[in-house]
């Protein structure tokens, strides 16, 4: 089965310099528009510098143009997550995480011009709107990525964050029935399933009408019924797993991690995930279907490498210079 990949750059603490246009002289200019790239198209005012859309918390400090940290004569993008921004459920039980990131992959209304009227609606239901847009790198294709990163010297050793990652693009029409059969539905079959099922992450739940305190059905602003997830009904849907490639910090270590999964329907209970503080470089942690490999790590932010594992000209140093990296898939 083909698994496409698209790029997302993430910075939780520090600044990333990409391509920003100087529009005013403010020190920090918040960027608060957000796009759910899987379920919605990007509006013109949500596209940043004709290139990116923002994902995650809308708090003003999360993503800003930073005119105090110029790069090549242009303001950088500042990404910041604070402790109380960790409001999303994490991979492990009781774990939380925060998100403030740019996505290079997204679709606009122009990508649906000339298509049947129901294509966009069905893409929203199957969460594949971004499959119609830009930024996709098909399996077997090659693409170069380049950006610069400034990491402040004050970055604490207790920070755990991913600052750049490449996501897979899961096919949500791949499901497992309550009887355990794994199969691929047609889009219309999935739309029918969605009429009775709400998926929370990869797990299906009964779709029940939400009621107010008087027991009356709740409706949205358009007068449509509002539904909520009831008890689990046994359905599973392909949601994807760990990112195929990630750059991050953990316990004072800078690391590059690669993940793979050869099973058709991802097993979300299989948490095969290399710990950068404990796993030797290029010694995969494996399960029956998954492998997780630390391709590189170093204590602190020392200059790193050239021509290692297909990555070229990557440099990072603390609090003074930028990092530049190219990736070929």
Image (cartoon, helix red, strand yellow):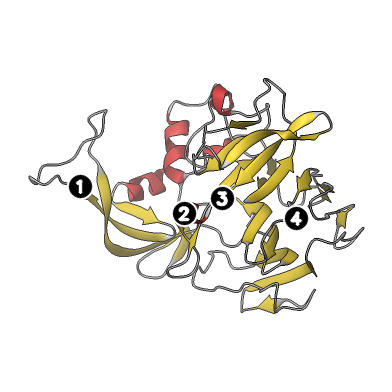
Question: Could one spot residue 11 in this view of the protein?
Answer: no
Question: With respect to residue 215, does 19 lie above or below?
Answer: above
Question: Could one spot residue 107 in this view of the protein?
Answer: yes
Q: Which residue is mark 3?
A: 81
What residue is drawn where x is 45% and y is 45%? Answer: 126
4 and 1 marks in contact (CB < 8 Å):
no
Q: Position of residue 192 (x, y in %)?
A: 34, 46
Q: Which numbered disc, 3 or 1, marks the residue that appears first in the sequence?
A: 3
Query: Which circle, 1 or 2, is nearer the viewer?
Result: 2
Real-space Cα distance between discs 4 and 1?
51 Å
1 and 2 marks in contact (CB < 8 Å):
no
3 and 1 marks in contact (CB < 8 Å):
no
Badge 3 density bin: few <14, some 14–19, many ≥20, Cα 10 Å: many
Q: Which residue is mark 2?
A: 84
Say which quarter of the image contains residue 236: bottom left
Real-space Cα distance between discs 4 and 3?
17 Å
Farthest residue, direction left: 214
Q: Which numbered disc, 4 or 3, marks the residue that appears first in the sequence?
A: 3
Q: Which mark is residue 237?
A: none
Q: Which mark is residue 153?
A: 4
Q: Is residue 230 left or right of residue 49?
A: left
4 and 2 marks in contact (CB < 8 Å):
no
Query: Which circle, 4 or 1, is nearer the viewer?
Result: 4
Real-space Cα distance between discs 4 and 2?
22 Å
Real-space Cα distance between discs 2 and 3?
8 Å
Q: Is residue 223 left or right of residue 118?
A: left
């Amino acid at each position: 089965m083909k698994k496409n990949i698209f790029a997302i750059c993430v910075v939780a603490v520090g600044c990333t310099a990409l391509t920003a246009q100087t529009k005013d002289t403010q020190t920090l200019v918040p960027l608060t528009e957000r796009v759910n790239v899987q379920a919605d198209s990007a509006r013109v005012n949500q596209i940043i510098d004709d290139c990116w859309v923002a994902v995650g918390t809308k708090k003003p400090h999360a993503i800003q143009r930073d005119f105090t940290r110029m790069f090549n004569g242009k303001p950088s993008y500042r990404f910041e997550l604070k402790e109380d921004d960790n409001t999303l459920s994490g991979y492990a039980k009781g774990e939380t995480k925060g998100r403030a990131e740019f996505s290079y992959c997204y679709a606009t209304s122009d990508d649906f011009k000339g298509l049947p009227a129901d294509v966009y609606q069905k893409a929203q239901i199957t969460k594949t709107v971004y499959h119609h847009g830009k930024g996709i790198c098909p399996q077997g294709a090659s693409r170069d990525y380049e950006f610069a990163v400034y990491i402040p010297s004050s970055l604490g050793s207790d920070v755990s964050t991913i600052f750049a990652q490449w996501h897979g693009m899961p096919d949500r029409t791949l499901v497992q029935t309550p009887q355990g059969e794994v199969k691929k539905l047609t889009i219309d079959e999935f739309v029918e399933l969605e009429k009775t099922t709400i998926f929370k992450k990869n797990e299906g739940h009964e779709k029940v009408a939400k009621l107010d305190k008087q027991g009356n059905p709740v409706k949205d602003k358009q007068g449509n019924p509002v539904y909520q997830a009831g008890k689990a009904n046994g359905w599973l849907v392909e949601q994807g797993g760990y990112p195929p490639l990630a750059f991050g910090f953990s316990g004072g270590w800078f690391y590059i991690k690669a993940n793979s999964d050869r099973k058709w329907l991802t097993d979300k209970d299989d948490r095969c995930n290399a710990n950068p503080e404990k796993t030797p470089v290029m010694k995969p942690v494996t399960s029956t279907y998954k492998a997780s490999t630390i391709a590189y790590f170093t204590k602190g932010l020392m200059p790193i490498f050239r021509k290692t594992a297909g990555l070229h000209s990557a440099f990072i140093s603390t609090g003074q210079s930028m990092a530049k990296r190219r990736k070929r898939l």
